[in-house]
Image (spheres, grey):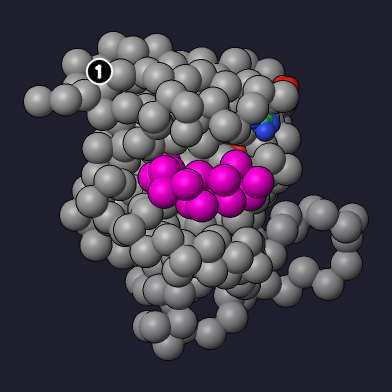
Amino acid sequence: MSKLRVAVLGAQGRIGSEAVRAVEAAEDMELVAALGRGDKLETLTEAGAQVVVELTTPGSVMDNLDFCVRHGIHAVVGTTGWTEERLAQLRTWLAASPETGVLIAPNFSIGAVLTMKFAQIAAPYFESVEVVELHHPHKVDAPSGTATRTAQLIAAARAEAGLGAQPDSTATGLEGARGADVDGVRVHSVRLAGLLAHQEVLLGGEGETLTVRHDSLHHSSFMPGILLGARRVTTAPGLTFGLEHFLDLG
Ligand SMILES: NC(=O)C1=CN([C@@H]2O[C@H](COP(=O)(O)OP(=O)(O)OC[C@H]3O[C@@H](n4cnc5c(N)ncnc54)[C@H](OP(=O)(O)O)[C@@H]3O)[C@@H](O)[C@H]2O)C=CC1
Ligand SMILES: O=C(O)C1=N[C@H](C(=O)O)C[C@H](O)C1
């Protein structure tokens, strides 16, 4: 059977360099290009890439996906910075290239995907919930894409269960002390040397709390998800948001 022809964008970055090694080690894949900033996107078509793994920056990802979709190259995207406007733009591009698939995964690690799922399940049963994400100090964005997605999923689960606003009598204080408000869920961002990527979902109710915590201790935690995404995206036309859809978690 012929090998899947995979290219990595952001190949010199923290996660991109790990992805290059993972693709090279995968028996069913061939690494056909490993591009950094300034490298020509035309290399992707010249190399016959079938799938691009996009691990660059929020400032670069849209141009890269525009090129990939126009050329019918499937994409597995870990880069953060997704807004409704950006997703709408991507859907427009995909509508003009209906056989092309794009997977955007806020987090490729199985534990983080399960954290989001567990938080969604628990959310209707607790009146209070806050998200704390903790990352290495070189991370460019805050809150993390994972924390934003987690908060959105919690907010949707609360709304579906008919829960109202959370109890919080804070009236005054320093700006930022209560974190960012994502759809009514507070998200707190810690940047600390020694950390990689971590998240806690704190849920509170009458006389009890529940904490769901996940720790990515090495970039290798993201690799099985990236490889799974590359294998599955070729038969999933259109936009898939979240690795859970390829894990059959719903
Ligand atoms: N979904 C997930 O599971 C994960 C997602 N991420 C996300 O992945 C992204 C990258 O993170 P990280 O590796 O830590 O960041 P890095 O800054 O280490 O890596 C990004 C790399 O992309 C390069 N780059 C920028 N623009 C382009 C371009 N147009 N073409 C090719 N390469 C480009 C950068 O080059 P230069 O240095 O010259 O700017 C850099 O080498 C972030 O958005 C992060 O949040 C990270 C881990 C897991
Ligand atoms: O920049 C990182 O490191 C990570 N980014 C992603 C995010 O913003 O959620 C995924 C993971 O948290 C690591």
Q: Position of residue 100 (x, y in %)?
A: 37, 54
- The answer to whether 193 appears left or right of 45 in the picture is right
Q: What residue is rendered at 37% in x and 18% in y?
A: 31
To which quarter of the image does residue 173 belong?
bottom right
Determine the residue located farthest toward the bottom in the rendered image.
Answer: 162
Q: Position of residue 75 (x, y in %)?
A: 43, 43
Q: Number of callouts in the render?
A: 1
Q: What residue is rendered at 43% in x and 17% in y?
A: 20
Q: Nearer the viewer, residue 157 or 127?
A: 157
Determine the residue located farthest toward the front in the rendered image.
Answer: 46
Residue linked to disc 1: 26
Q: Is residue 53 above or below residue 59?
A: above
Q: Nearer the viewer, residue 99 or 173?
A: 99
Q: Is residue 58 magenta?
A: no
Q: Is residue 67 magenta?
A: yes
Q: Amino acid at mark 1?
A: Ala
* Image region (quadrant) for ligand 1: top right
Tell me: is circle 1 under 8 Å from ligand 1.
Answer: no
- The answer to whether 167 appears left or right of 161 in the picture is right
Q: Position of residue 69 (x, y in %)?
A: 48, 51
Q: Residues within 10 Å of mark 1 (few under 14, many from 20)?
A: few
- Find numbered disc 1 in the image and state the secondary structure of the residue it sits on: loop
Q: Which stretch appears magenta?
A: 62-76
Q: Nearer the viewer, residue 203 or 6?
A: 6
Q: What residue is rendered at 51% in x and 19% in y?
A: 34
Q: Is residue 195 visible?
A: no
Q: Position of residue 131 (x, y in %)?
A: 55, 52
Q: Is residue 147 above or below residue 205?
A: above
- The answer to whether 132 appears left or right of 216 in the picture is right
To which quarter of the image does residue 170 belong?
bottom right
